[in-house]
Amino acid sequence: MQTVKMVITGPFSAGKTAFISSVSEIDVVTTERKISSDAERVKEDTTVAMDFGRITVDDDLVLYLFGTPGQRRFDFMWEILSEGMLGFIVLVDSVRPETFREAKHILEVFRGYSTTPYVVAANKQDMPDAWSPEDLRIALKIEKEVKVLSCVAQDKDSVKEVLLELLYSILERMQLEEG
Amino acid sequence: MALKGNLQDFSTTQLLNLVNLARKTGKLTINDQSEKAILYFREGRLIHSSTNTDEGHLTTMLLKTGKLSQEQASVIHNQTNSSSDRIVGKYLMDAKLVSRDDIVQGVKDYMLEIVYDLFTWGEGEFFFEQDVLTPNDRITVPLNLDNVILEGSRRIQEFDRLQDELPDLGKIALKITDKPLRDVKLTQDDWRVISHIHPRNTVKQIAQNNNMDEFQIRKIVYGMLQAGLVESMQPEGMEPKKREPVTRAGRRAASQSPAEKRSVVTKLIDRIKGL
């Protein structure tokens, strides 16, 4: 069986758990992982909690959704999770501009790890104080080629849209690379 | 859709940049304890401003910017006794106390004084109300925000803030945007930086080429970024290293043919649609 992976990242409390929960066929497992001594800055027995969801496509293919740990002290996990990913989603809390800088930092770090396609999801768009995706794009200085999408993480259809847009971006990239 | 927050998290420069690039029309209110500033914009250009101590009437503006004396202002107030700035403006021009250019310049100078002061506010709650226009009786003068942002950025003294925005000068290169530089007021130092912009030159190299220290180059580049004159990019030759996959999933993904990979993605799309 083949497994593919997408990473959902973003600042603490951006809605990563809700996002994965909306579409996962299993209860979102907050995985406690023991980290090997290869990981930087962490002792051998340190455990890390992160979100994990699953979508089974068929007998031969499963999609795993990994939510990066929210706490900054576990940011060493980002590189581990990014390896082999199909693409990633940066979730931004549209109601909390104090988190935008962190979101931008996370985005830059992940772009440094991999050239895989990504989208930015402006979460909590159902809240009255939410910044619009267009304003978020400018605030985070995101290039026009990158999709900045409206999102309500607790709404399954909204989450599906974000996942689909990422998949379309991945397909487009593949077609471009094939020439 | 709301646009609200605190200057602690989103500076005046960033706010004006957002209004400028998004070509917003509306009213921006910024409150900091006892002080309040109100700015009006039309399609991304500043058209009027006032504070809680001055309501931004024409006579006050001209008095504060030295176009009128206190005595003249008192006389005008008694003569016109009107809140309409348009009537006051006409009276002033008819009385040859000021010219039309004086009025325009006076309004601009007044607005700029308020805005430049805002650049020094480290905190304050802001709230932007889309499509709220100035009261009808006020005279408005559109002001291009590019120069305001550039000048405001030049006034930023806090190194920490600049460092936050541009943490590692050795890892950023710049590219010039399509924005025309024709009407933008650039200093000699600004032009020297622009002339060294190249995909392979990091900002650190540009600074070295121009004998600028980190603070100087950060101020200049920050201002240009905020004004939308340049964009940051990864320097050429510094793309992410291609890493050999170490996990089984990673190795399997790397060994698949393009057609196999496309098939996987197509299957995923169909599956997600069916959720």
Image: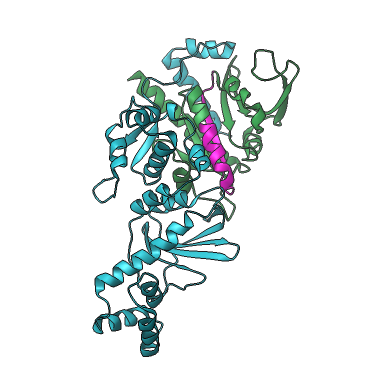
Chain colours: A green, B cyan
Q: Does the stretch in magenta take in B134? A: no
Q: Where, quadrant-wise, is the N terminus of chain A in this rendering?
A: top right
Q: Is residue B68 visible?
A: yes
On screen, residue A130 versus residue A175, left or right, reads: right
User: In x, y percent, where is residue B258?
Assistant: 42, 16
On screen, residue A75 versus residue B129, left or right, reads: right
Which residue is drawn at the image coordinates 37% and 34% (left, top)?
Answer: B212
Which residue is drawn at the image coordinates 63% and 36% (left, top)?
Answer: A16
Determine which quarter of the picture holds residue B248.
top right
For residue B187, above or below residue B210: below
For residue B11, above or below residue B63: above
Q: Where, quadrant-wise, is the C terminus of chain A in this rendering?
A: top left
Q: Does the stretch in magenta take in A85? A: yes
For residue B9, above or below residue B48: above
User: In x, y percent, where is residue A67?
Assistant: 63, 30
Taking the view exactly as shown, the residue that stands out farthest to the right is: A45
Query: Which of B93/B268 is in front?
Result: B93
On screen, residue B104 versus residue B126, left or right, reads: left
Determine which quarter of the picture holds residue A40.
top right
On screen, residue B168 versus residue A37, left or right, reads: left
For residue A79, above or below residue B22: above
Q: Is residue A143 visible?
A: no
Query: Which of B18/A21 is in front?
Result: B18
Q: Where are the magenta residues, as a range?
A: A84-107
User: In x, y percent, where is residue A134?
Assistant: 45, 47
User: In x, y percent, where is residue B31?
Assistant: 56, 62
